[in-house]
Image (tube, rainbow, N blue to C red):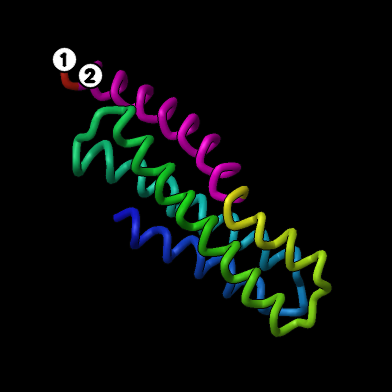
Amino acid sequence: MAVFLRIGYALVGIVLAVPATHVKAWRLAAWVVSAIGYAAHIAYERFRLQNSPASAALHVAFAVALGAFGLAAGANIHSLSAGSTNQHRQLLLLSLGIWPVMTALPAFLVAFGTSIVLARALGNVRSQ
């Protein structure tokens, strides 16, 4: 599931960045699609696989980190064809390591908190 969503996150970010018109709307669409995938992954981990909150959050954060790496790789490839400056390419090389870390930590924390809330809510529903 993490690999599937990683590809999805990266494709959404790359494909929805292509249109040159209505850029803000396309970026918003990419955020919305990614948020839906993120929420679906949390639900899948909790309801279908019945993973613990920590395990579910770790899997979700891993998928987000892989997606961020895919976006960074796409940005690096695009910089080669766009004729970017050498300094810009060096900064993009750093993004291969920074973007996954920068996205994985918040993704883990939000997924962990959401999973705990879901676990408690399900525990209350099941006990009644």
The residue sitting at 28% across, 41% down in the picture is 45
Instruction: Choose between 68 and 51: the one closer to the eye.
Output: 68
Q: Residue 128: percent from the left, percent from the top?
A: 17, 15
Q: Amino acid at mark 1?
A: Ser
Which numbered dot is residue 123? 2
The residue sitting at 40% across, 46% down in the picture is 62
Q: Amino acid at mark 2?
A: Gly
Judge from the rendering whether residue 33 lies leftward or rightward of residue 115; answer left or right. right
Which numbered dot is residue 127? 1
In the picture, which quadrant includes the N terminus? bottom left
Instruction: Choose between 91 and 29: the one closer to the eye.
Output: 91
Instruction: Note whether 104 is above or below 116 in the view shown.
Output: below
Q: Can you tell which quarter of the image residue 54 is in?
A: top left
**Identity of the residue furthest to the left in this view:** 127
Q: Residue 9: percent from the left, percent from the top?
A: 48, 60
> Magenta segment, which residues?
99-125
* Mark 1 surroundings: few (<14), some (14-19) or many (≥20) residues within 10 A: few
Judge from the rendering whether residue 36 lies leftward or rightward of residue 121; answer left or right. right
Instruction: Note whether 79 is above or below 53 in the view shown.
Output: below
Judge from the rendering whether residue 30 lies leftward or rightward of residue 113; answer left or right. right
Which numbered dot is residue 18? none
Q: Residue 33: percent from the left, percent from the top?
A: 51, 59
Label 2 close to label 1 by CB (< 8 Å): yes
Judge from the rendering whether residue 43 lies leftward or rightward of residue 71; answer left or right. left
Q: Residue 113 colored magenta?
A: yes
